[in-house]
Image (spheres, helix red, strand yellow):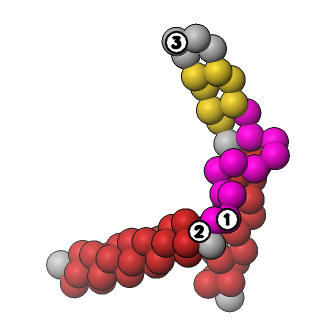
Amino acid sequence: MNNIHKLLVLAGIVLIVLGGVFFVIQKFNIPLGRLPGDIIIRREKFSFYFPVTTCVIASIVVGIVIRFFRK
């Protein structure tokens, strides 16, 4: 039961950090999600958006963070 408490606290901290990151991205008008290389297809009654470049950058950042905490 003790592990569940630690997991919930960690999840809360992660959500607070993500909220702060999104606030900073919006406040400083960082174009995350609208980068060159992101695929946007717009038709009359259809739109498709796939953030390829944003996914690659997010993957690199997550990989660096995981590598940092493993050592």
Residue 52, relative to residue 57: is it above or below? above
Q: Mark 3 vs mark 2: which is more N-terminal?
A: 2
Q: Is mark 3 on a helix, strand or loop?
A: loop
Q: In this view, does 58 lie to the left or right of 15?
A: right
Magenta region: which residues?
Answer: 29-39
Q: Mark 1 vs mark 2: which is more N-terminal?
A: 2
Query: In this orientation, which residue lies closer to the viewer: 44 or 48?
Result: 44
Q: Residues within 10 Å of mark 3 (few under 14, many from 20)?
A: few
Q: Residue at x 32, y 77 (%)?
A: 12
The C terminus: image quadrant: bottom right
Residue 36, relative to residue 1: is it above or below? above
Q: Pick out the residue farthest to the bottom.
A: 71
Q: Which mark is residue 45?
A: 3
> Whole-Å distance between the Cαs marked 3 and 2?
30 Å
Q: Pick out the residue farthest to the left.
A: 1
Q: Which mark is residue 25?
A: 2
The N terminus: image quadrant: bottom left
